[in-house]
Image: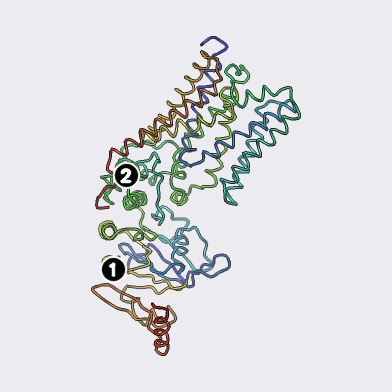
Amino acid sequence: MFSSFMINTWIAGTAIALVAALVGYFVVIRHSAFAAHALPLGAFPGAAAANLLGVNPFVGLLVFVGMGVLLLRQLARIGRRDVGTGLLLVLFLGVGALFLSMTSEYAPEVFSLLFGEMLGVSDADLWPILGICALVSVVMITIFRPLLLDSSFPDLAALQGISAARMDLIFLSLLALVTASALPVVGAFLVFTLLVGPPAAAQSLSIHPLRSLLLAVIFAESSIWSAIALSYWTNWPIGFFVGMLGAGLFTLARSYRHWSQRQRPAVQVSSL
Amino acid sequence: MTNQSPILAVADLSVDLGGRSILRDVSFDLYPGQLCALIGENGAGKTTLLRTLLGLITQRAGTVLIGGAPAREHRELVGYVPQKINFDPDLPLRTRDLVRLGLDGQRLGLPFFNGRTRYAVDQALQAVGAEDFADQRVGELSGGQQQRAVIAHALVRKPRLLILDEPLANLDFGSANALVDLLGRLIVQQKMTVLVTAHDMNPLIPVMDRLVYLVDGRAATGTVAEVVQAEVLSKLYGYPVSILHHGGRILVLPDAPENADVANMNRCAGHGV
């Protein structure tokens, strides 16, 4: 399980889970799960177009997800972002299907980028992943405070000179980068589970901003490590285990929160 | 009081939005320790006036000086409590974390506590009486408690002017009285200047000493005694009004039109009103 050809998988998986938890923490607070689902789908047309043109799939993904970020920003301005996000999602799939229909020979490779591949991490792939993860982590920790205030109460943030538009652009860009880093191991489609499952579970269990952030990272790392190990032993696709663990973790944490809320009186009578 | 300089000086303020005139020639000064009620019905221009004071809207004419400088330059002197306060119940944020973000939420880095921030946050929590729910999830508090948390968020930077938008709307009587007491303590103990918007001035009568009465973008301003006069308000409304005093409460009513009242009554009776 820890043989040389698996080492890169462990390293990449660990890095991806870290940034997915950090960015996913805000995906949950900002109610952006739908955008976090749609944006990574840009990997599909991206990878298909890259195959068609014979360039690195990373490049194709960054182009399409980057366009997705700009489109979502525009949609925020004209309103009904939820509808726009849904349309963007299908647009990505449609364009991807078009590109894929033009080239059938590399379809399995596109499939592995979308759904993950345990042994898909070469040494050449590892460095860009680690670079992106380091960048996302540093930016995330740097803007944590203003982004937390903006995500909790935009009106108050604006009065402290925090621009909601700027925060949204930074947040969506980080989301796009996480998608890119997740391509080889977890796959673009399945990174969504890591983005929302562990942070939502952590926020259900801890009311402390930093402790719930740490808990989200711990949950995400446990999920990805378990998924790699289980996938190695069973030979089942890693995506299956990532999906199962994310949903299971979320369900358990929400059930606990629901149960603990019922232990307390629902209405507290006090002077205010 | 007149030997001090005003915290807030509004002079001949006119604001247009989307080509429509919203405020016309509004002028008033507020000094330390004063509580001013900004009274007006929906659409009178209260929110526009607040947003102009906060530097979020640019005026067509006139000046707004906060601490002697244009509104935008002295943002740290102003604390603001919005009307709509509705935190997500799952937000991983305690009351003290929210207050702490009021202190330095705009700075970069993680929000760790140190001795200085912990002291400032405790002071603000104490000032609004929020110690009991300081360590609870802010989204799970009652509406009144969430409002206190946001007031503490505004107070923690020690502003000299505190602006509250319709703080009494959606509060039950007990909570409204407690809030009015709190505002009274802030102006007396901390010499803070407080500006409160409301559609009804009565709950604020025990603590307010200045009044800005807005009708359709124009304002009558001054002490309560100066503004609440039939003559002043009739001129502002553009039709005759009467003022009823009852048990320390004030009611402003339009006069019944002399000639039309019989016809009106008949019409009302005809509709079964």
Question: Given contact means CB atoms under 8 Å apart, are the residues at marks 1 and 2 in contact?
Answer: no
Q: Secondary structure at mark 2?
A: helix
Q: Which residue is mark 2?
A: B121
Left or right of B1: which side holds A162?
right
* Picture coordinates of residue B11, whole percent (x, y): 45, 69
* Picture coordinates of residue A253, whole percent (x, y): 39, 32
Q: Which mark is residue B46?
A: none
Label 1: chain letter: B
For disc 2, the neighbor class at 10 Å (few under 14, some 14 to 19, many from 20) is: many
Residue under the point 52% across and 19% down: A11
Q: Which residue is mark 1?
A: B205
N-term mark: 1 or 2? 2
Q: Quadrant of residue A36?
A: top right
Q: Is residue A7 above or below residue B222?
A: above
Q: How is the image coloured?
A: rainbow
Judging depth in this view, the residue of A163 and B91 nearest the camera is B91
Furthest toward the bottom, the residue is: B259
For disc 1, the neighbor class at 10 Å (few under 14, some 14 to 19, many from 20) is: some
Residue under the point 37% across and 40% down: B93
Q: Quadrant of residue A118?
A: top right
